[in-house]
Amino acid sequence: MTEPAPKVPVLGGLTPYLQVKDARAAAEFYKAAFAATEVFAYPPGESGKTMHIHLHINGSSLMLSDPFPEHGHPHQDPQGYNLTLQVEDADAWANRAVAAGATVVMPVEDMFWGDRYGQLRDPFGVLWSVNQAAV
């Protein structure tokens, strides 16, 4: 039987929970790309899959797991959403993510609404935005 997770603070008012192929590799990527801190993870099971990883990124929580089709949770490619990081230096965040292996979807630019904004896709197919509010 799996032990209960320790009491780790969940940050932010909305917590995305992503199912990605190879959640462990995704967590390592998010550490390099977005300065994530891993606050809890169950060890991989006998199948090598991870059922839960909890990260803190930029003042918010992000949860990850591998797909478990045998339990009704098959993998589906990410589509129709992005995760937006509100940051003080969009260029620095985007550059760090690209150096870690993200691809640029929309370069960071000054936008018509006044903010500095860009989009990146991580190696797991998730679309991320970096947004720097206009001063």
Image (cartoon, grey):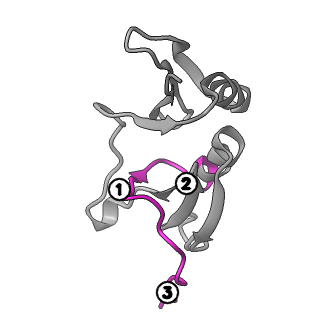
61 left or right, relative to 33 = left
The residue at which mark 2 appears reads as 59
Residue 48 magenta-drawn? no
The residue at which mark 3 appears reads as 2
Q: Amino acid at mark 1?
A: Leu
Q: Amino acid at mark 2?
A: Gly
- Residue 48 has which mark? none
Please tell me whether mark 1 or mark 3 is closer to you in this view. Answer: 1
The residue at which mark 1 appears reads as 14
Q: Position of residue 48 (x, y in %)?
A: 58, 64
Q: Residue at x 38, y 61 (%)?
A: 68
Disc 2 crowd rating (10 Å Cα; few below 14, some 14-19, many 20+) is: few
Asked which quadrant contains residue 123, the reply is top right
Q: Residue at x 49, y 47 (%)?
A: 21
Q: Is residue 73 above or below residue 25?
A: below
Q: Residue at x 30, y 67 (%)?
A: 71
Specify the segment rendered in magenta: 1-26
Residue 49: tell me if it is visible: no
Q: CA distance from mark 2 to mark 3?
A: 28 Å
